[in-house]
C-alpha cells in the first residue's frame, strides 16, 4: 500500500507541477523558468510523497500522525512556492504580444 501511494501521489504531484511550470509559462508567452525555487518545490513534493508512504508503512508505529503532518506541510510548501512565483504570469497578460496558447514569440 505504501509503495502504491508513493507512486500515485508522488508521480501525480510532480507531473502536475512539471506541466504547470512548462505549459503555464509557455502559454503566458514567457520562456521557461530555471530558478532554484523549482528545485525546492520539486523536493518538497517528493518529500511529501515519501513522508506519506512512511506513514502508511508498518514501521511508522505511533508516529503516523507526525508523518501525515510532515507530508501535508511539505505538500503545501511546494505548491505555495509555485503560487508565489507563478501567480503573476498565470493571472496577468502575455508579455510578448502573442495571443492565445501559442508559444512565446521570439524577440528578434
Image (cartoon, rainbow, N blue to C red):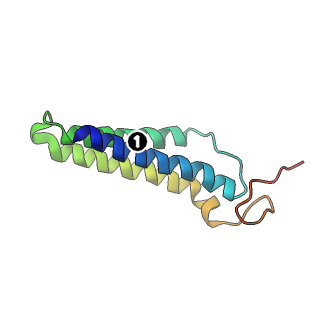
Identify residue for label 1.
Answer: 44
Total tally of numbered discs in the picture? 1
* Local secondary structure at mark 1: helix
**Number of residues whose C-alpha sits closer than 10 Å to that of mark 1, classed few (under 14), some (14–19) or many (20 or more):** many
How far from the left and from the top, in percent, is residue 31?
71, 47
Viewport quadrant of the N terminus = top left
Residue 33 locus on image (x, y percent): 64, 44
Answer left or right for 56 relative to 27: left
- In this image, 79 relative to 38: left or right? left
Residue shown at 33%/42% (left/top)? 49
Q: Residue at the spot x=66%, y=66% of the render?
A: 92
Residue at the extreme left of the image, as rendered: 62
Pick the front one: 1 or 57: 1
Closer-to-camera residue (53/38): 53
Looking at the image, residue 50 sits to the left or right of residue 32; the answer is left
Residue at 71% x, 52% y: name it: 30
Please state if 94 lies on the left or on the right of 36 as rendered: right
Image x and y of residue 42, in percent: 46, 41
Tell me which residue sits at (76%, 53%) in the image: 104
**Farthest residue toward the top?**
59
Amino acid at each position: 500500500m505504501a509503495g502504491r501511494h508513493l507512486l500515485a501521489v508522488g508521480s501525480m504531484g510532480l507531473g502536475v507541477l512539471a506541466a504547470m511550470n512548462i505549459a503555464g509559462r509557455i502559454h503566458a508567452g514567457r520562456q521557461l523558468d530555471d530558478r532554484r525555487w523549482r528545485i525546492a518545490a520539486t523536493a518538497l513534493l517528493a518529500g511529501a510523497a515519501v513522508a506519506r508512504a512512511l506513514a502508511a508503512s508498518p514501521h511508522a508505529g505511533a508516529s503516523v500522525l507526525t508523518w501525515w503532518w510532515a507530508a501535508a506541510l511539505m505538500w503545501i510548501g511546494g505548491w505555495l512556492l509555485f503560487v508565489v512565483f507563478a501567480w503573476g504570469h498565470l493571472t496577468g497578460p502575455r508579455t510578448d504580444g502573442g495571443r492565445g496558447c501559442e508559444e512565446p514569440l521570439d524577440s528578434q
